[in-house]
């Protein structure tokens, strides 16, 4: 089965834009997923469409000689595609802001590579194609991540993501830097930013369904908890009434206490609000919830006094 990450990469691999946008995408890919020297650039990927896209970008923009080979991946079942480009490699690496004029790795790209919103989105698209992954929303947690080798690049990508208020963070993990987003809505926003419209529809449909299901479960749990609370409260009240009846009997109780004792025993599963409505209807007088609560407090006080004075007796 094709993973959610693969589906996203398949969708955005051939996203068309201006030459500047395509250079920004290619820059992100080469900076984060390439081995190179003065003679060649080698990029590896498990995604055939990403491999084809890189092939076209390198050959179309820079007229390089590019080949694609595939082989078994030692780490999993997927095929590994190797894209190798030869030609004026030094010029290409400089033009893509991978190395500087001294042929040293350039820690951060120049601003003109992300001069406008479209270029920024294109760079983030390239980052996802080269080292990004996201959990399928059907799983138990929401998580999008990029594994980046260079610390300056990791924080650059983090800042770029947070320029869109995505609340991304950076941690060191397995000798690489993981830039990640955990909020469901922010992950959906990222997918919109990189132009993965089909993935957004799938993601949001699943997310909304899960949120609705979770809300329903929470409401059901709250309702069950309220039912249990009502029953436990009623049982405590009935226990207090039984203690009073065993010691004093009904004759020594005033009329209001007698009423509430009678109806509580008769309707043991009713809430205080329900009991007030029942009594109001049957007795043809207004008996409020707060009035009942006051009577039950008096019953509790009476029962507590009896228990205090009869500590060694079993009621």
Image: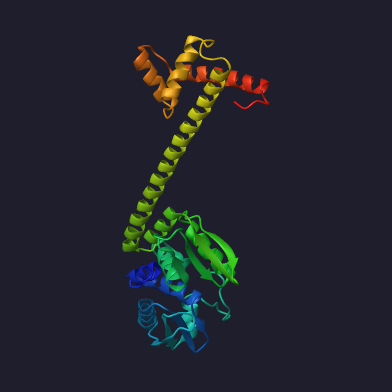
Q: Does residue 154 appear to the left or right of 203 in the view shown?
A: right
How many labels, in total? 0
Residue at the (48%, 28%) spot, across then down: 234
Can residue 298 be seen here? The reply is yes
Instruction: Name the one closer to the observer, 235 or 7.
Output: 235
Residue 173 place in picture, x, y as percent: 58, 68
Residue drawn at 35 percent across, 16 percent down: 282
152 or 286: nearer the viewer: 286
The quarter of the displayed image where residue 44 is located: bottom left
Q: Left or right of 261: which side holds 118?
A: left
Q: Where is residue 265 in the image (x, y as percent from the top left)?
A: 45, 23
Report if residue 110 is visible in the image: no
Tell me if residue 203 comes above or below residue 108 in the rendering: above
Q: In this view, does 221 lie above or below 5?
A: above
- Quadrant for the C terminus in the image: top right
Residue 136 image offset from top left, x and y in percent: 40, 63
- The percent coordinates of residue 157 (x first, y second) are 51, 64
Seen at 42% across and 30% down, the residue is 269
**Residue at point 38% right, 45% down?**
216
Q: Is residue 99 above or below residue 266?
A: below
Which residue is nearer to you in this view: 16 or 307? Answer: 307
Quadrant of the image containing the N terminus: bottom left
Asked which colour scheme the image uses, the reply is rainbow
């Amino acid at each position: 089965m094709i993973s959610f990450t693969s589906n996203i990469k398949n969708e955005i691999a051939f996203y068309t834009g201006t030459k500047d946008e395509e250079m920004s995408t290619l820059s992100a890919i080469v900076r984060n997923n390439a081995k190179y020297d003065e003679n060649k650039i080698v990029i590896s990927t498990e995604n055939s469409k990403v491999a084809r896209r890189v092939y076209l970008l390198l050959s179309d923009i820079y007229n390089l000689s590019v080949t694609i080979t595939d082989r078994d991946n030692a780490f999993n079942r997927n095929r590994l595609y190797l894209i190798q480009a030869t030609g004026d490699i030094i010029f290409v690496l400089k033009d893509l802001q991978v190395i500087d004029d001294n042929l040293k790795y350039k820690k951060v790209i120049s601003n003109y590579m992300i001069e406008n919103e479209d270029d920024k989105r294109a760079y983030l698209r390239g980052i996802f194609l080269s080292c990004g992954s996201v959990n399928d929303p059907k799983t138990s947690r929401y998580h999008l991540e990029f594994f980046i080798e260079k610390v300056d690049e990791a924080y650059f990508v983090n800042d770029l993501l947070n320029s869109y208020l995505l609340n991304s963070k950076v941690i060191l993990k397995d000798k690489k830097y993981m830039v990640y987003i955990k909020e469901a809505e922010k992950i959906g926003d990222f997918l919109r930013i990189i132009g993965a419209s089909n993935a957004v529809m799938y993601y949001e449909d699943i997310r909304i369904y899960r949120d609705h299901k979770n809300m329903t479960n929470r409401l059901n749990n709250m309702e069950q908890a309220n039912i249990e609370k009502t029953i436990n409260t009623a049982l405590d009240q009935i226990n207090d009434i039984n203690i009073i009846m065993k010691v004093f009997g009904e004759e020594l109780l005033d009329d209001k206490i007698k009423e509430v004792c009678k109806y509580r025993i008769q309707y043991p599963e009713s809430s205080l609000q329900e009991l007030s409505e029942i009594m109001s209807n049957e007795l043809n007088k207004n008996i409020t919830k707060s009035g009942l609560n006051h009577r039950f407090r008096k019953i509790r006080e009476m029962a507590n006094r009896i228990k205090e004075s009869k500590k060694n007796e079993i009621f």
